[in-house]
Amino acid sequence: MIIPVILSGGAGTRLWPLSRELYPKQLLPLVEQETMLQSTVTRLAGLDPLGAPMVVCNEEHRFMVAEQLRSVDRNASAILLEPVGRNTAPAVAVAAMQAMAGGEDPVLLVLPADHVIRDAATLCRAVASVVPYAEAGKLITFGIVPTGPETGYGYIRSGDALTNPGKPAGQANGEGAPYAVASFVEKPDLATARTYVASGDYYWNSGMFVFKASRYLRELESFAPEMVAACRQAMDQGASDLDFIRLGAEAFAACPSDSIDYAVMEKTADAVVMPLDAGWNDVGSWSALWEVGERDEYGNVVSGDVLTCESSNCYLHADTRLVAAVGVDNHVVVETADAVLVASKDRVQDVKEIVSQLKAQKREEALLHRRVNRPWGTYECIGSAPRWQVKKIVVHPGATLSLQRHHHRAEHWVVVRGTAQVTRGDEVFLLSENQSTYIPLGVNHRLENPGKLPLELIEVQSGSYLGEDDIERFEDTYGRA
């Protein structure tokens, strides 16, 4: 059995303003109609036998991850929630422990949730071809066949070709054989990268792996025993919560932070690299999105309501309004409801510096979009000033908000579409379109959608403090009380 382990803990700061800390790039449909997380699991349909995926993600992303998997009919066998990020080695360690909890020892296919792979069939064939090596105790990474000298990736130097352990001794390996790993190499300068590509012995480091759960844990325990001990303690202290497994926060926070490469692959004697040429891209910047996008006759990649005049080789994205580009070349322009990014394509790696400034100023644009996802639906701020705020709220059919109260604000609700069931103190009543109600400060209340269509309403808040942390929950379907 092959168990996909999807690593979904990244923040994607280089793709701001679309990617935000609480709504990162793997949860966005940046390249296809599916989100990157959804594409990561659906492209594995050609593998057999394939188990339900496990996902390791940030606790703040849990409901979006679960809903996105359900919407493509790929329910997770487990969603492991990291209280803090500790890089990939501990994330895979807790996934391996969970995979072995039932007494089995499956082969794990470790995949980042935010990569593009155009040729899913080639990926599946490559994975299937290395399973015998994993069963024999090897730890396999996929090396991307380079298309040119790239300075933004680490490289893997290949050694001798390996004999398939599933074939009789002396039988030829054929094409597509994996190789022993000779060495891992840090990101090179341009001249060095050119020599790597010319040699034919080097591959881009993809961050994708195949190995047995027990084998990975044995190697990790050999090289980083304190990491394994912390992960076991975090699992022991963990608790199940709806679809989720919450890791013990104190133990996991004490875990050393390291990547799989540094913790295991660069030290083990059993590292194997499988060449892969499947249209891979890690979409680590806006220029990478331009590379994988569909370009018009002028080399522009356009998304949304965009007009151009004598502009070329640009990435132009409009979320909420018209964007017009005149005489622009080699630029990125990305518009959202609350921010606009303009950058030279040659400088897009520096977008993370803008995010650092936003965080230093404690601005919400680093964390959230104006529209915020919740397990029951969404809310979006459409206007605010001192002592008042107006939001549009959308509640999924059958969904229920928590029973709650506020200590610093009152609320007016106006239903604009659908039917609302309102709990206000001891009252329970229905509101239909164009009807409204008032929730006084300090009164327990709850909003439900009993219908089969989305419920849309306008909420007008007034009071001395309007922050989202002014919520005291008493009951909650989603375990947040």
Image (cartoon, rainbow, N blue to C red):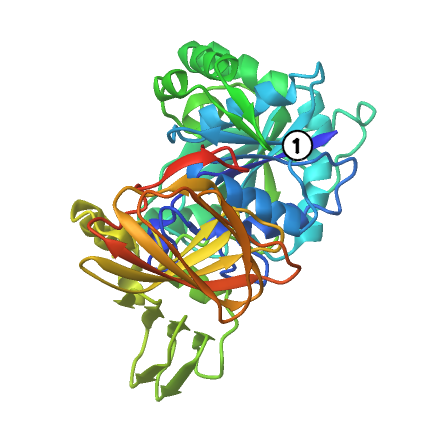
Disc 1 marks which amino acid? Ser
Q: Quadrant of the N terminus?
A: top right
The one of 203 and 446 positioned closer to us in this rendering: 446
**Residue occupying the point 75% across, 40% down:** 174
Q: Quadrant of the C terminus?
A: top left
Instruction: Please say if 233 is above or below 303.
Output: above
Instruction: Please say if 305 is above or below 65.
Output: below
The local secondary structure at tag 1 comes to loop
Which residue is outermost to the bottom?
309
**Residue occupying the point 46% across, 16% down:** 234
**Residue occupying the point 41% across, 40% down:** 404
Question: 380 left or right of 426?
Answer: left
Q: Which residue is mark 1?
A: 77
The one of 37 and 456 positioned closer to us in this rendering: 456
Q: Is residue 8 visible?
A: yes
Q: Quadrant of residue 196?
A: top left
Q: Position of residue 351 (x, y in %)?
A: 27, 56
Question: 275 left or right of 332?
Answer: right
Q: Position of residue 458 (x, y in %)?
A: 41, 64
Q: Quadrant of residue 53?
A: top right
